[in-house]
Each structure stands twice: as structure tokens, then as C-alpha cells.
Image: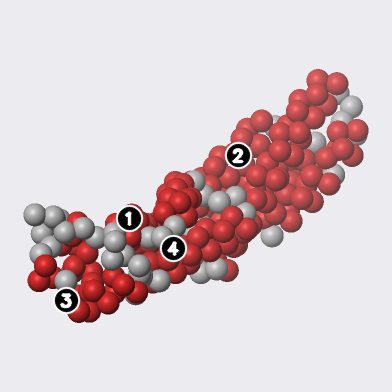
Amino acid sequence: MILDTLKATNSVMLDSIQVTNNKYAAKTFKEQVIALGLCAPTLEQLLNVITALKNKQIAPEILTAELKETLQMTVDNCGEKTNDHTLDATTVQALKNAIDLCKTATESAWRDAADKHCTTVIDSLTSLKSLLPDKKEADDLLEALGNAKIKMPTSAKGIDEFLSKVIRGKEIVDGLHLDDEVEKFINKVKLQKATVSDLTPHVLEWLKANDLMNTMKVRF
């Protein structure tokens, strides 16, 4: 509804400019119509991201009722003033402000959702990277996920790419087939507290299965 109203407003812009007779008024009106036209793709992109986040159940509720009402009101005002040739800078700025508020809310929701989805994966990849056969892939995933937490994707495709990287990270970690006994051993190794007695038959089997027998070193 919001985007449809703005698109309908844009469609009558040129006709509105042509029927405005006063030269100064026409110049001012044209400037604001152009400014309004620049808002449309920004708002469309934002609404598409919000819809994608909702459909993918990443962030179901982003905009409050108050934000939705404010956005709809500013879009309607722009539409009405475009139709009667009274569109001014204040009205267009009100729309820009509403879009900025919605963008801020969406970015905040994204950061919370991204953190929830990938923090565990990032922590696991970071702590286990030295044990992975493809360390470059782990580094690339860590960089991509870290950037995604900071910068919100601008499309549904970007969101899908983020989710696929989270899934890939989980696959890499799960591929190590860790269990409590192995994790306990790894933690002791990191703290340099592992002893020969910690090399249980199960741990040795895990080291062999993951081709890590030559990676772990015993030190005195």
C-alpha cells in the first residue's frame, strides 16, 4: 500500500510539472518532485528487505504501528501535494525522515537477528580453525559473517547468501564430529593443560579420523 501510493505519485509527476504555470513555483515544484522521485527506490529497497526478513522468519516484526502510520501518512501527504501542485521541501523531508526511521529500526533488527544466527558459528570456527583442513575457507566465512553482522544486506539475495554462509559454517564445525570428551580434550590443549592421560582411545580415534595425529604435539 505504501509503495503503491508512492509509485502512483511518481507517475503523475511530469504532468503535474507541465500544468504549473508560475515559473518560480514550477521550478520549486520540479525540484521537490525530483527529490521525491529519489525516495521511491530507497523505500522500495527497504520494504523489500523488511518483507524478506519477515518471510524468512529472521525478524518477523520490525516496524511498529507508529512507524507504519508515520510512513503511510508522509507518503499520502506527498501524493496529495503532488496532485494539487503544492509539494514542498518540508513535505518531502518528512518522508525522508520517516524512511530514515524505518531504516534505523530495520538495521537494528538485522543486527540482533544476525548476531543470534551466526555468533555460535563464528565462535566455533574461530576456536577450531587450527584443526580445519581448509583454513582459508574458514577465514573467508569469518570475514563474511563478521561484515554481515555490521552491514545489513540490501536485498533478499543478500540475506540468502548470509544464511548459506551460516549453514556452511555449521557444516564445517559439525564435520569434526565433536563430542563432550573431544571438546574437553581440545580445551585442555588450548590451555596447555593436556596430559598423556587425556589421550583416551576415543580421543585418539577422533584424531585419526580427522587426520590430526600429526597436528597435535606433546611437549614437556
Callout 4 touching callout 3 (CB < 8 Å): no
User: Which residue position is annotated with label 1?
Assistant: 130
> In x, y percent, where is residue 6?
73, 49
Q: Position of residue 22 (x, y in %)?
A: 86, 23
Amino acid type for the residue under numbered disc 2:
Lys
Residue closer to the observer: 75 or 211 = 211
Classify mark 2: helix, strand or loop. Answer: helix
Gap in angstroms between the C-alphas marked 2 and 3 = 64 Å
Q: Nearer the viewer, mark 4 or mark 1?
A: 1
Distance of mark 4 from mark 2, alpha carbons? 38 Å
State which tag comes first along the sequence, 2 or 3. 2
Instruction: Check if mark 4's residue and mark 2's residue have beta carbons within 8 Å.
Output: no
Label at residue 169: 4
Residue 68 position, x and y percent, is: 56, 56
Q: Pointer 1: residues within 10 angstroms few (<14), some, or many (20+)? A: few
Task: Name the disc covering residue 96, or none.
Answer: 2
